[in-house]
Image (spheres, grey):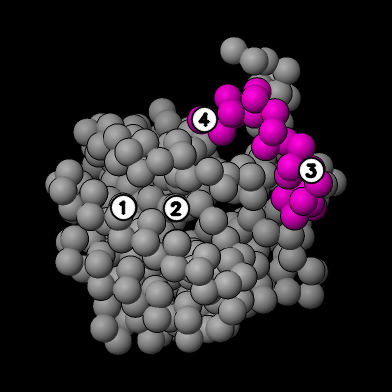
């Protein structure tokens, strides 16, 4: 129930305005977001890479409704990629892109054109792009754009969400040589006809999908903080004779940092999903929904001005 309320709040404009105006909210934001600027993003990425971690940077923003907003997103990513290359971080730092921020709701072709510009810049910088998953109404469009991008940039990554009932089938379609697939549980409120509601069913779907991806010749990326799923992925990777470096774990910035470093110390590849930018509200609420215990930290931040 609490998770459903938090996800509903993520789309509430009135609550968004109220919370983003409270100075104390910035305390929680800094736990999960690198900062507002590209300088913040690059500096935080450099610190993570120095600790042996890989990074996927996300310029926060989604549901752009006009071409000008989509162009602003593209320019932000072009600047970010230029800075990553200049800082020699590109071999360990890629970018994650939401197609709704590149114009998907305006027209799919606009999103494809803008994502192509980002992929071309990423190639020049020496890194890759992963297309973030959003709510289920965008899944087919996102996979169509992915297929087009992979014609020129075959390393373009996909994100699939185990809470969607269709995802095991999508994993089978994408578990091919050269494909990069990030598997996560999913953080959007979805109707029961398209998504599992029971957390146990979501976890079981994650395991089924992980088996499909590990059995294939692609490069799977397992995005979870669930200790049980981390252990299961580790065991299944051994069963499928997966060598270190042939798959990776992914975790959010600010979530289980000690576990991230433990896995690195054991020889695993761990990539930190690192968001930055001022449009943090929707992202933050979905993080709270994934782990409602974070709400206590959030409430303490709201009443503190320090």
The residue that mark 2 highlights is 59
> Left or right: 299 with respect to 40?
right
Q: List x then y, in percent, for residue 128.
A: 28, 64
Q: List x then y, in percent, for residue 305.
A: 64, 15
**Which part of the image, by quadrant, shows the C terminus?**
top right
Q: Indicate whether residue 233 is drawn in magenta.
A: no
The answer to whether any part of residue 35 appears in the image is yes
The residue that mark 1 highlights is 80
The image shows residue 16, relative to residue 158, as above or below, that is above
Query: Of the residues under marks 2 and 4, which one precedes in the sequence?
Result: 4
What span is in magenta? 8-30
Give the residue drawn at x 39%, y 65%: 74
Specify the farthest residue to the right. 1
| SS category of the residue bearing label 2 | strand
The front one of 77 and 250 is 77
Query: Around disc 4, counting alpha carbons within 10 Å, would you say few (fewer than 14), some (14 to 19), or many (20 or more)?
Result: some
């Amino acid at each position: 129930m609490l998770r459903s309320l938090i996800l509903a709040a993520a789309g509430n404009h009135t609550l968004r305005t109220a919370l983003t105006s409270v100075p104390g909210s910035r305390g929680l934001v800094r736990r999960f977001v690198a900062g507002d600027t590209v300088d913040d993003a690059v500096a935080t990425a450099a610190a993570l890479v120095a600790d042996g971690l890989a990074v996927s940077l996300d310029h926060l923003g989604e549901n752009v409704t006009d071409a000008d907003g989509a162009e602003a997103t593209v320019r932000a990513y072009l600047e970010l990629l230029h800075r990553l290359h200049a800082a020699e971080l590109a071999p360990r730092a890629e970018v994650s892109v939401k197609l709704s921020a590149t114009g998907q709701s305006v027209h799919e072709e606009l999103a494809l054109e803008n994502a192509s510009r980002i992929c071309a810049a990423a190639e020049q910088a020496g890194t890759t792009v992963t297309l973030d998953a959003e709510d289920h109404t965008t899944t087919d469009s996102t996979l169509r754009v992915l297929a087009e991008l992979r014609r020129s940039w075959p390393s373009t990554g996909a994100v699939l969400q185990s809470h969607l009932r269709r995802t095991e089938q999508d994993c089978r379609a994408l578990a091919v040589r050269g494909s990069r697939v990030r598997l996560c549980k999913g953080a959007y409120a979805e109707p029961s006809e398209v998504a599992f509601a029971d957390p146990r069913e979501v976890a079981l779907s994650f395991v089924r999908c992980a088996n499909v991806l590990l059995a294939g010749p692609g490069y799977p990326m397992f995005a979870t903080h669930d200790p049980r799923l981390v252990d299961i992925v580790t065991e299944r990777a051994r069963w499928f004779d997966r060598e270190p470096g042939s798959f990776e774990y992914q975790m959010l910035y600010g979530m289980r940092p000690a576990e991230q470093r433990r896995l690195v110390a054991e020889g695993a590849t761990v990539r930190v999903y690192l968001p930055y930018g001022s449009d943090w509200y929707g992202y933050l609420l979905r993080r709270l929904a994934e782990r409602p215990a974070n709400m206590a930290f959030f409430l303490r931040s709201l009443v503190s001005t320090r």
